[in-house]
């Protein structure tokens, strides 16, 4: 959650700066360091749930009216089947770590 907080904080600062008649410049050479998996390492199921929920929201919003309902049902089944596989993996990994089999997963 720290990453999301920092992004929201930076965005808020940028908005306040813009409202104060400041100028915001686009710097294409700017580097951003993303700490790999900072949020997903501590709460992987939470992150996966919201990723898959977002995928479904995206498909409903942009593709619902373009494709037949049968295809949309298949897409929904595929997304939630994928979530169940990922959730099973993380559950297995957590149980293995609890039992002391941390290496090799």
Image (cartoon, helix red, strand yellow):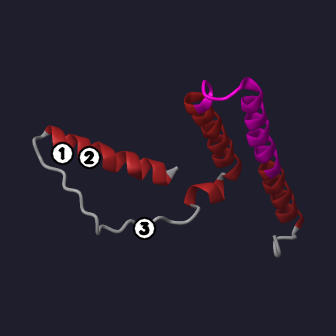
Residue nearest the observer in this picture, 45 or 59: 59
Where does residue 66 sit, x and y in percent of width and height? 61, 28
Mark 1 falls on what kind of element? Answer: helix
Give the side of residue 37 with respect to residue 15, left or right: right
N-terminal label among 3 and 2: 2
- Asked if the residue at tag 2 contacts the one at tag 1, i.e. Cβ–Cβ closer than 8 Å, the answer is yes
- For the C terminus, give its image quadrant: bottom right
Determine which quarter of the picture holds residue 28: bottom left
Secondary element at tag 2: helix
Q: The residue tagged with tag 3: helix, strand or loop?
A: loop
The residue pinned by badge 1 equals 17
The answer to whether residue 29 is left or right of residue 85 is left
Give the Cα separation between the discs numbered 3 and 2: 19 Å
Magenta part of the chain? 63-85
Q: Residue at x 74, y 32 (%)?
A: 71
Marking on residue 72 = none
Mark toward the viewer: 3 or 2: 3
| Vertical side of 56 occupied by 2: above or below | below
Disc 2: which residue: 13
Mark 3, Cα crowd under 10 Å, few <14 / some 14-19 / many 20+, is few
In the current view of this chain or complex, which residue is farthest to the bottom? Answer: 103
Residue 30 location (% of width, % of height): 30, 67
Residue 33's tag is 3
State the residue at coordinates (87%, 63%): 96
Q: Are marks 3 and 2 in contact (CB under 8 Å)?
A: no
Say few, some or many: other residues with alpha carbon within 10 Å of mark 1 (under 14 / 14 to 19 / 20 or more).
few
Relative placement, left or right, of 5 versus 63 is left
């Amino acid at each position: 959650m720290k990453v999301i907080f920092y992004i929201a904080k930076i965005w808020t600062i940028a908005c306040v700066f813009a409202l104060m008649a400041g100028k915001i410049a686009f710097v294409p050479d700017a580097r951003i360091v993303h700490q790999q998996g900072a949020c997903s390492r501590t709460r992987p199921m939470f992150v996966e749930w919201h990723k898959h929920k977002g995928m479904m929201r995206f498909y409903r919003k942009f593709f619902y009216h373009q494709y037949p309902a049968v295809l949309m049902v298949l897409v929904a089944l595929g997304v939630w089947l994928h979530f169940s596989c990922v959730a099973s993996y993380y559950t297995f990994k957590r149980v293995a770590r609890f039992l002391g089999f941390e290496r090799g997963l």
